[in-house]
Image: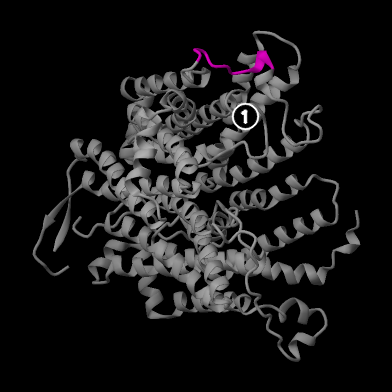
Amino acid sequence: MLKLEKRPQPSRLWTWVTPLLAVVITMLAGGALFAALGKDPVEAIATIFWQPLFGEFAFYYRPQLLIKGAPLILIAIGLSLGFRAGIWNIGAEGQYIVGALTGAGVGLAFYPTESVLIFPLMVLAGALGGWAWAMIPAVLKLRFGTNEILVSLMLVYVAEQLLAAMALGPMKNPEGMGFPGSRNLRQYESAHNAELITGTGMHWGVVAAFIAVIFAYVLLTRHSLGYHIRLTGQAPRAARFAGVRPARLVLVCLGTAGALAGLAGMFEVSGPAGQVSIDFNVGYGFTAIIVAFLGRLHPLGILLAGLLMALTYIGGEIAQSNMGLPAAAIQLFQGMLLFFLLAVDVLTNYRIRLARREVA
Amino acid sequence: MDMGSISPELLLASLMVAATPILLAALGELVVERAGVLNLGVEGMMITGAICGFAVAVNSGSPAIGFVAAAGGGAVLALLFALLTQVALANQVASGLALTLFGLGLSSLLGQGYVGIKPPPVAKLDIPLLGDIPFLGRVLFSHDLMVYLGLALVGLIWWVLKYSRAGLILRAVGENHDAAHALGYKVVRIRVMAILFGGACAGLGGAYISLIRVPQWTEGMTAGAGWIALALVVFASWKAGRVLLGAWLFGGVTVLQLNLQAAGFAIPVEYLSMSPYLITILVLVIMAGDKSRAPASLGRIFHASQ
């Protein structure tokens, strides 16, 4: 009979081995899934993980890695701060949408004026929009004690409706011949989040993502605020005795997550997506939750996990067009990853021992 | 716009229908939370139930078999949650989120090829005499069986939790799992059973949306109903009777805004569609003060040898 024995401290080795183990198990289970769908499992896995990096058209797919990875990393970094402190913001998708709306809104308001100041203003507006949207669950939690999980999630659905209302109403392109969706920001030079180095996929959002990783790393390892966040997550009672103010942490964690998600949305709408449209959001806010956990809530881990997740998006698209693998299969594949990660995580915190049956 | 086109009789009758899916899901979650487990995967289990029920009903031609399959589908997904949280001792919040993400992916994969198909119709019960009462007959006594099943479940869960031995044990496990364990109750086994029950209820709720309420299959069709069900449990202070009240409130808001949309109310449709979610937030704010009723062990990990 197997028995779990709690480790005095989480194993350092297993902390880093379990994500890799989860990826391997997901590949095996995913292979079985693809086989069940009538596709060659080896070819499918190779298409997803190998083709985008080293395949024939890798020169086209490699830049995509940064384009798809940047929003995931930006959002996941923000989420990880809260998750560490036991503050569960799962409404990043909504904050992402609102950041895109406010950012694009500022850009569209200035159309067709050309100025170098417009893009920085849009960046500011995007961050503020996401921040404000995240402040709603934060303030309600502090003022009334509501559950931030439910409030932030409800606000995702509100934001989706707001997006539709904007795309069909105030932000609709007056020269768009009645089609829903805003003007294309890619054709408006001052508002365009253009590629910084041609052919690399590098845009301002990628730069922001790298900066966020560095800042989060410094914050968590060198700053007292980061220490408070970690302490609150590990020992809430001890944290209170140590003088940590929980209210401040809620505001900081939710606010940072919201601002970063808003930035991600703003960089997306002004660059890769180009316009405010009804189906602008593709679930980055939810996938980022997987990224945050897969990266062990550690900035460097999140960087790697974000790139890996971006790989599954790109590889998934290739498998979709080349092998006819359904898009939903990729979504399921990503969901499985979080599942297996949580399951094997037991090895980090517990030892598995063989034990004789005893009276429970 | 024409307010007169909204008939109160029809409004109340469709309120009963709109309330049923969240009522079923919330009742299941109520039992789970009373056992001390927080399962945030209701949305994932609902949507899985919706497609399982739909697919089986279409293939078998029988909505009844569809509902059984939906309960099974929801329970299977819940079993995954039980394995994660009760056996692998994973964080319940993260596991619940994983369940929802997984369920959404799984359902859209299973649902390919079912888009645009009509499911077999579900017969409404024609209760003689009662159904003929003016107004009340239309509102209360002219629905399908599932509406009444939901109502019966409210009574049953209320009675079991309050008066039966099984309910007492379930509550003991939820209030203090260490004490319940010391008394010799199988904490993990009881919780796994509660989780499976919750999954089955969520599955039924999902299938009610895809087979009766809408009735067809579209991706992500539960649109947050599972999350509203979770909010409903908080709103109800973990009491079965108040879950019913809450479900009617949300059903009422949903139906009213749909009617306003149809009547051409002078607000864009998108803003009206926000209302159920905004009302949920409002209700959470109003009810947040009353946390005293929450099961004391809610969301805590139980490990016997500690």
For the point 69% across and 25% down, which residue is it?
A: A184
Secondary structure that dominates the magenta span: loop
Q: How is the image coloured?
A: one colour
Q: Position of residue B124 (x, y in %)?
A: 69, 80
Q: How many marks?
A: 1
Residue drawn 64% across and 24% down? A103
Residue A228, picture quadrant: top left
Q: Is residue A132 left or right of residue B165?
A: right
Q: Which residue is mark 1?
A: A100
Q: Quadrant of residue A125?
A: top right
* In the foreground, B83 or A234: B83
**In this rendering, does residue A243 appear at all?**
no
Magenta segment range?
Answer: A188-198
Q: Chain of mark 1?
A: A
**Residue type highlighted by circle 1:** Ala
Q: Nearer the viewer, residue A271 or B268?
A: A271
Residue A191 lies within the magenta run: yes
Q: How far across and how far down the image is residue B197, in percent? A: 43, 70
Residue located at (33% from left, 62% from top):
B176
Quadrant in which the C terminus of chain B is drawn: bottom left
Q: Which residue sits at x=53%, y=48%?
A: A150
Q: Could you tell me residue B278's position as x and y percent?
A: 66, 48
